[in-house]
Amino acid sequence: MEFTAKQISDLLQGTIDGDPGTTVNKLAKIEEGTTGSLSFLGNPKYIEYVYTSKASIIIVGNDFVPENPVSATLIRVEDARGSFAKLLEMYNQVMRDKKGIETPSFIASSATVGNDPYIGAFAYIGNKVKLGNNVKIYPNCYIGDNVTIGDNTTLFAGAKVYSDCVIGASVTIHAGVIIGGDGFGFAPSSGSYAKVAQIGNVIIEDHVEIGSGTTIDRATLGSTIIRKGVKLDNLIQIAHNVEVGANTVIAAQTGIAGSTKIGKDCMIGGQVGIVGHITIADNTKIAAQSGVGSAVTEPGQIIQGSPAFGISDYRRSYVVFRKLPDLEKKISELEKALAEIRQTIS
């Protein structure tokens, strides 16, 4: 799609220095701008590129005063970075604005599909599925029986949702996500392990985003629940009957064992491991690569380490840990000196 400087300026409530009829059809970083591209100056370190960039339009702050000639048309706004972010979001929405039902795809006769859907090729929509309005199901997705998906939710290519799961409105599920696979439930039986049937489901509330390759297991009984506004990175494992509180964010490669309850507004770093059947209080921050083996009962704590404990104590302990080779050397020297003193006395 092509836009003029005037159209963009009107959208951003900016002012134009240059030709209002200048057109662009793509976005680019300011140092990589080419003819027909739109860029922005959001950091003073990149001012030099305003004068050398070949971008056709550059968004700048109202306080920008050029010291050399600028070939690009400038659009002046209050916040250049924020305005460009707004354009990125709009561009993203346009790029994802797919509609229609591609073939071949399978939609069960008992399924209900809302208005303006997009269902990509080779998608499977099972019995009694309920899809809200403006739902987008990309190619090779699997939606099991009795699944409900709310308005404006998007499932990217290859996502899988097992039977009976419930997904809210305005949810984004990226490629390769698996929702509702069996929880890891086995009972020891005469030297082997008997599988415990996992008959619960997964509930994903509104405005959740789930990164590629993440897996969320169905509950043994009841529901595994991801509350409103949660953001999950790629490659996260959430086990059966876990509950993740509202607006919590979790970074990649974290694993949460069964029946653990994570509070709201928590921040969990990458490669964190959390044992099962514990509670993590609201507003807890867990540093990357920590191992949490016991409940966090006091809200607002910052913890680190394996096993994890208060970050201030961890940092003091780590200072001592790094000095252990020197301390060991000093102890050996003291032991040697003490042995020589004892030999002299005796």
Image (cartoon, rainbow, N blue to C red):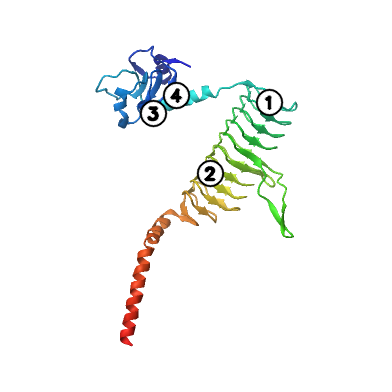
Q: Amino acid at mark 2?
A: Lys
Please state which of the two labelled residues, at mark 2 or mark 3, is closer to the viewer: 3
Residue 92 relative to residue 141: left or right: left
In the picture, measured across the screen, residue 196 lies left or right of residue 59, that is right
Position of residue 67 in the picture relative to residue 210 (left or right): left
Tell which residue pokes out farthest to the left in this image.
67
Q: Label 2 belongs to which residue?
A: 264
Q: Amino acid at mark 3?
A: Arg
Q: CA distance from mark 2 to mark 3?
A: 29 Å
Q: Quadrant of the C terminus?
A: bottom left
Q: Are marks 2 and 4 in contact (CB under 8 Å)?
A: no
Please report contact status of discs 2 and 3: CB closer than 8 Å, yes or no: no
Judged from this view, the residue extending furthest toward the bottom is: 346
Q: Which residue is mark 4?
A: 87
Query: From mark 4 to mark 3, how far is it between C-alphas?
Result: 10 Å
Of marks 2 and 3, which one's residue comes earlier in the chain? Answer: 3
Q: Please tell me whether residue 108 is drawn above or below residue 191 in the rendered image.
A: above
> x, y percentage for residue 253?
53, 45
What is the x, y in percent for residue 114? 66, 24
Who comes first in sequence, dot 3 or dot 1? 3
Mark 3 and mark 4 in contact (Cβ < 8 Å)?
no
> Which element type, helix, strand or loop, lies under badge 2?
loop
